[in-house]
């Protein structure tokens, strides 16, 4: 990837280098990026409301995850990890 052009094969190669149990996090991140892209488009045309958020794919994102018992604790843990990465 010296030319900074990332191909679908590059992405699939990186995906396959991760343990299967991490793939759910990849899907979550992809959904976040899709939501973020939609928000940026909508930001220019309208204000994001609670209704918009409820209609987004973010609500219920973790509903089918059997490894997350307490979503509030899990979200808190993710925020803490992000803050620690930012500090480094």
Image (cartoon, rainbow, N blue to C red):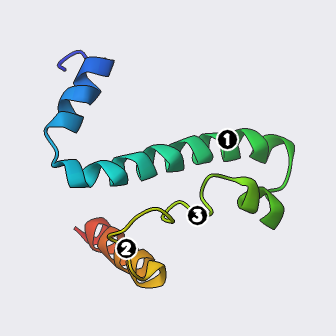
Which of the 4 image quadrants contains residue 15? Answer: top left
Picture disc at residue 68: 2
- Return the x and y of residue 66 as percentages of the image width and height: 36, 68
Tag 3 residue: 60
Quadrant hosting residue 86: bottom left
Q: Residue at x 72, y 38 (%)?
A: 41
Residue, x 20% and y 48% (percent of image)?
Answer: 20
Mark closer to the chain start, 3 or 1: 1
Q: From where the camera sits, is residue 4 visible? A: no
Element assignment for label 2 = loop
Q: Is residue 1 visible?
A: yes
Q: Residues within 10 Å of mark 1 (few under 14, many from 20)?
A: few
Q: Residues within 10 Å of mark 2 (few under 14, many from 20)?
A: few
- Quadrant of the frame with the C terminus: bottom left
Report which residue position mark 1 lands on. Answer: 38
Q: Position of residue 5 (x, y in %)?
A: 31, 17
Proximity of marks 3 and 1: CB atoms separated by less than 8 Å = no
Choose the circle earlier in sequence order: 2 or 1.
1
Where 14 sits versus 67, above or below?
A: above
């Amino acid at each position: 990837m010296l030319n900074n052009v990332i191909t679908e094969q590059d992405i699939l190669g990186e995906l396959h280098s991760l343990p299967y149990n991490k793939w759910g996090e990849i899907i979550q991140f992809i959904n976040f990026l899709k939501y973020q892209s939609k928000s940026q488009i909508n930001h220019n045309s309208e204000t994001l409301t609670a209704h918009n958020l409820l209609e987004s794919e973010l609500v219920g994102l973790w509903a089918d995850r059997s490894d997350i018992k307490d979503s509030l604790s899990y979200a808190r843990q993710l925020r803490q990890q992000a803050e620690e990465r930012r500090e480094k």
